[in-house]
Image: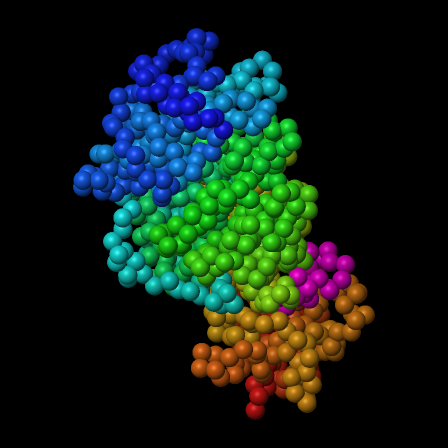
Amino acid sequence: MSSAPEQEAVQEAVRAAVPEAVGDDRPASAPVPAAVNGHRPGHDRGGPPVWPGAPTPLGARFRVGPDGVAGTNFALWAGGAEAVEVCLFDADGTERRCPLTELTHEIWHGFVPGVRAGQRYGFRVHGRWDPWTGARWNHAKLLLDPYARAVDGDFTLPGEVYGHVRDWPQQSVADTVRDDRDSAPFVPKGVVVHDEAPDDEWVDDRRPKTPWADTVIYELHVRGFTKLHPGIPEELRGTYAGLGHPAAVEHLQRLGVTAVELLPVHQFAHEDHLLRRGLRNYWGYNSIGYFAPHAGYAASGTAGQQVGEFKAMVRALHAAGIEVILDVVYNHTAEAGELGPTLSLRGIDNRGYYRLQNDARRYADYTGCGNTLHVVQPNVLRLITDSLRYWVTEMGVDGFRFDLAAALARSMHDVDMLSPFLAVIAQDPVLRRVKLIAEPWDVGSGGYQVGAFPPLWTEWNDHYRDAVRDFWRGALPDVRDLGYRLSGSSDLYAWGGRRPYASVNFVTAHDGFTLRDLVSYHQKQNAANGEGNRDGTNDNRSWNCGAEGETEDAGVNALRRRQLRNLVTTLLLSTGVPMLVAGDEMGRTQGGNNNAYCQDNEVGWVDWSLLEDPGWRELFRLTSRLLALRHAHPVLRRRAFFSGRPQAADGLRDLAWFTPRGEEMTQQDWYAPASTVGLYLSGRDIPGRDARGAKITDDSFLAVLHAADTPVDFTLPGPPWARTYELVVDTSRESQEDGPGTVHRAGGAITVPARSVLLLKAGAAKNP
């Protein structure tokens, strides 16, 4: 960091610089103005006066200052910087620069009178350019405020001016040459938001506070879920307002989910390699603004209105009893590697915000996206936790799913479950009360951490995904793994006070095949992504049911729909927290694309016309029926792991497994290949108490999962398990209107159709 006299010299140079037209025609090869301490000073655009202001809170906060004067306080942590300017942009793009001359604990700050809500702004930060030591200050690059509450504009082409010289003869060393071309016309700007909300803003809002054991997650994309919905006004499709519209909310209520998990809604940027191919980042896992709702999803405007629109969406979902969980990307940013654009953190303090290698030119990349945030740094950790608290307290959200959470849990290099990030979350009075979901891996060494996160956390359980896919395609070597997955994955989570709801069970997610494509394609079809079909996983564990892709073969299509019913039924009868993906309940397809991250079109959007097809409408009805069944029966959403021990003298256990012979499975059975499994869930004495302290009892159920291509006779277990069994669900039937309700005597055999699930209610499950 420079000495105080050096900083004062830089600041004086900034104040005294000669004005220059915005977006001038100076060619890249033109002489650079005289440098101060080795770098070019900023330019005074005739900005308003700047008063000292305050170092907190960080970001741009409108307030009434001294003597009753209204304006905005700007505060930016920029460790090691030598000067900072806040740049104000008029509607026509005219830029006015205001030097922030106050420095408190590495926070540059100042109060600018007259700056009100709606003002677009950014920062220019001065300092050394020395990539070999990780110093990448370059005041020619306009920087987005990390604490901006709203953002206007996009990262756009041309790509030559974002932070490196792309046309430099030797691209491998291009990042070592400072590019002094102005990036302001091509990068997003922050927007000042009047966030002094009235005390009663959320007074009519009632957070559902759904217990984890009762939660059903529905992963959706704000734009993709609403873009084609015929019941949403056209001007609201693809927006927060569209998701809050009664037509969208009604579908969620009819389905029966309790929470929506939104793919990233933090402001994100489109990668230049996509823009050059005429594509866009659709999923949004390329964050650049951790406080700002993505402006591209706003119907009301991008001058701060997106904040109110997002809040209104949350209130509408809450009123319907639906929680809002955000998929958040704090592990990396849109600035990518050393050849990526300079948009914000890199130009503020590259060494402070990012993990660097021993060769400080290079970034440590545990994310596969070019960089990794240095979460052990106090101010980086502060940025993340401030952002999380903001979304809970001011935006009303109910929880977070952390993308590549293992990268956040790394201390210096290794994943550490006592890391600063996890420790701060555990003690934070706001964050420890909301839902916390980890994607428990990253791409670095030792990054796979399924089952390792501490209490308070739930995890995406890919063991569940793989076991269920393999069972239904006939690829499990034995049924041990399936047994663990259907009963809550106690092998992963029965430690440290964790419960079955630590497992988020899923068969599909945004990343990979849709449910319909899982039974329609053996190979991915990603040519439209422009990467030669090299992107996306090759390990799909899929089965195309005899034909690759769409077909007119009625037999193949009937089998595919049956397999979809099997997969949905298995998921919703399993112990743990089920997660559905938007559109899977009605047969959405991506045409075999298993990495549709750049498909902001009909490939990635939900096709609502599918509900006009009787077959897909029946899949929706089955899904809704199963969710209603789950809601009605606590035995299907247990809060404690099964013991497997007798509950009474009659030998009835809370969990038992049966072979087709009607006999309990032996150790030998578990280690043998099997295509038929019977799972008995006892509701006689469920651990826990209701709200009044009474014991919880329920019906008991027998689920028979049969993955073979021929029928099998299954003997129904007799007393003490049951005396009769009533058929509740039969996935061999497209419609559940006929068939269910049939009663069978215990001890007798029933025929289980090929590739099907039968769910039967035991006639003597309750304690007499």
Q: Where's the C terminus, which quadrant? A: bottom right
Q: How many marks?
A: 0
Q: Quadrant of residue 643?
A: bottom right
Vertical arrangement, residue 704 with respect to residue 330, above or below: below
Q: Residue at x 27, y 37 (%)?
A: 72
Q: Residue at x 59, y 72 (%)?
A: 640
Q: Residue at x 76, y 62 (%)?
A: 478
State the image coordinates of residue 537 (x, y, percent, origin top left). Answer: 64, 42
Q: Which residues are magenta?
A: 469-492
Q: Quadrant of residue 555?
A: bottom right
Q: How is the image coloured?
A: rainbow
Q: Which one is in front, 704 or 415?
A: 415
Q: Is residue 29 left or right of residue 684?
A: left
Q: Residue at x 35, y 35 (%)?
A: 109
Q: Which one is in front, 655 or 121?
A: 121
Residue 462 located within the stretch drawn in magenta: no
Q: Residue furthest bottom?
A: 768
Q: Which one is in front, 280 or 501?
A: 501
Vertical arrangement, residue 315 with respect to residue 681, above or below: above
Q: Residue furthest right?
A: 668
State the image coordinates of residue 176 (x, y, percent, origin top left). Answer: 56, 20
Residue 475 located within the stretch drawn in magenta: yes
Q: Which one is in front, 95 or 551?
A: 95
Q: Is residue 74 left or right of residue 605?
A: left
**Residue 558 visible within the image:** no
**Residue 33 visible within the image:** yes
State the image coordinates of residue 690 (x, y, percent, origin top left). Answer: 48, 79
State the image coordinates of residue 590 (x, y, percent, origin top left). Answer: 53, 44
Vertical arrangement, residue 619 with respect to residue 720, above or below: above
